[in-house]
Image (spheres, rainbow, N blue to C red):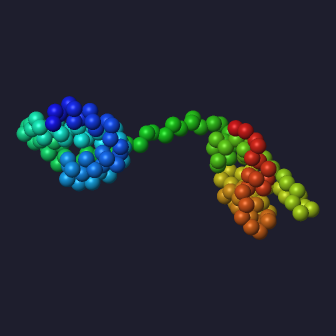
Amino acid sequence: MNMAKEISTLNRLSPAQLRERYAEVFGERSRSGNKQFLVKRIAWRLQANEHGGLSQRALQRAAELSADSHLRLNPPPLPIARASPSPAPRSRYIGDGRLPGVGAVITREYRGRTVQVKVVEGGFEFEGGVHRSLSAVAKAICGSHCNGFLFFNLLRRSA
């Protein structure tokens, strides 16, 4: 069969048919179901089978490169952009516009009593104890877990 004609027929096959063709050409099942990937890989293999594949020099170079154990499999993570430190930090939750600054007092009426929580560096002060989160304070007040921002009605405040 003419190579160009055979490759052009690959584009008309369904992904299931391409996976079958991939298994015929490569002798193993494909882990991918992506149609474009399968078409390219099958076309490459058909051409390599007909024209001889990679040269011996290219195969040797590929073996040399793959033998290097220090090669990364994944790209390094992108650096995290850090904001410059502000003279007066808002709280330990930097960048969360829902929270007032350090020293502010959050007040809420709960079951007939007024609850006051002071924002301190590293957490929230309530009845002599420091809690790491508003949710921990809300749990101490009502006895069960709930969202601290929701409990103190701080969800609508924007950054």
> In the shown orientation, is residue 53 left or right of residue 110?
left
Q: Residue at x 51, y 37 (%)?
A: 81
Front residue of 66/58: it is 58
Q: Is residue 136 above or below residue 94?
A: below
Seen from this angle, which residue lies furthest right? 112
Indicate left or right for 55 with 103 as reference.
left
x, y percent for residue 157: 76, 41
Please say if 111 is above or below 104: below
Residue 71 lies, with reference to residue 51, above or below; the image says: below
Q: Is residue 100 in sight in this rendering?
A: no
For residue 1, say whether it is visible.
yes
- In-front residue for pair 35/92: 35
Q: Residue furthest top?
A: 4
Q: Quadrant of residue 60?
A: top left
In this rendering, the count of numbered labels is 0
Q: Position of residue 72 (x, y in %)?
A: 29, 46
Q: Residue 49: horizontal and vertical position, in percent? A: 13, 41
The N terminus sits in image quarter = top left
Q: Residue drawn at (43%, 39%), measured in percent from left and top?
A: 78
Q: Is 67 on the left or on the right of 141, as rendered?
A: left
Q: Residue furthest bottom?
A: 143
Q: Residue at x 63, y 44 (%)?
A: 94
Residue 42 sits in which quadrant?
Answer: top left
Position of the C terminus, as image quadrant, is top right
Identified at 19% across, 41% down, the residue is 45
State which quadrant residue 96 falls in: top right
